[in-house]
Amino acid sequence: MRPLIAGNWKMHGTLAEATALARGVAAGPAAGADLLVCPPFPHLAAVSEALRGSHVALGAQDCHAAAKGAHTGDVSAPMLKDVGARFVILGHSERRADHGESDAVVKAKAEAALAEGLVPVVCVGESEAQRLAGEAEAVVAGQLAGSLPAGFAAAGGVVAYEPVWAIGTGRTPTEADIAAMHARIRAELERSFGEAGAALRILYGGSVKPGNAQAILALPHVDGALVGGASLKAEDFLGIAGAV
Ligand code: PGA
């Protein structure tokens, strides 16, 4: 399947930097992968404009479970759709940790995204303590069971496996560990969604860089990458996309 290389810009950059980064990514070659960038909320409209007519898709980093209402500081899926987003990252470990998002909350948000025709990119991943305790696969299987709504596969939903301890640390699991986890995720997706689960993209995220991208992206059931730090420079992000 065609890989997806997604940039999670997190809480970085001015408006000018965001639009310049978007233009830089869009100016790169249409590699053998689909490209996606996910800027902070205030920059979505300008980045949407900067990407207009390009091969790079727009996504957001979160949405609320409700379509509208009295939710100060939150942003709804219809608003994201309206501004040109096609994807939304949900359940990133930073949101699970910083905002106490449970699997049930992530699932409700994913349902809201699906209702708007947005593709959810649902993040799962174990902590270092959980990996050391030999619980990594069970933790991730539990997160998948709790976070993915019924319509997920029909909508071409994306799963991102991001071990918490590999995010922003420069550390990555061994290739064997990544391959084993992605095989487990594939099995869980097939168990939940049947044949449709075989066609869903499973991204790896956590310290992906141009230097390690090729080896990681070549692993079975690794169908792309969710990139944080290295997505903030167009050259690095395009280097990762070029490693597909
Ligand atoms: P990183 O972040 O590439 O900076 O490790 C990945 C992510 O959190 O999505």
Image (tube, helix red, strand yellow):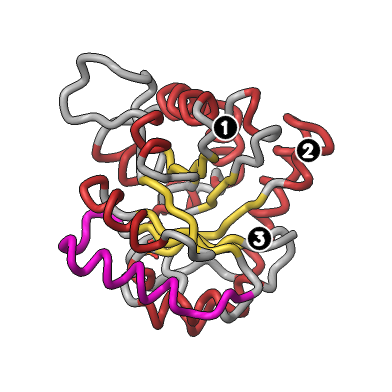
Bounds of the magenta segment: 10-31
**Residue at image mark 1:** 142
User: Are the residues at dot 2 and dot 3 in contact (C-beta closer than 8 Å)?
Assistant: no
Q: Position of residue 92 (x, y in %)?
A: 39, 44
Tell me which label, 2 or 1, sits earlier in the chain: 1
**Residue at image mark 2:** 196
Relative depth, front residue between 170 and 138: 170
Residue 234 lies in quadrant: bottom left
**Identity of the residue drawn at 26% across and 15% down:** 69
- The amino acid type of the residue labelled 1 equals Gly
| Secondary structure type for disc 1 | helix
Residue 150 lies in quadrant: top right
- The amino acid type of the residue labelled 2 equals Ala
From the viewer's perspective, tell me whether residue 83 is left or right of residue 202.
left
* Crowd around label 3: few <14 · some 14–19 · many ≥20 (10 Å): many
Residue 29 within the segment the image draws in magenta: yes
| Secondary structure type for disc 3 | loop
| Secondary structure type for disc 2 | helix
**Residue at image mark 3:** 223
- Quarter of the figure with the N terminus: bottom right
Relative depth, front residue between 161 and 237: 237
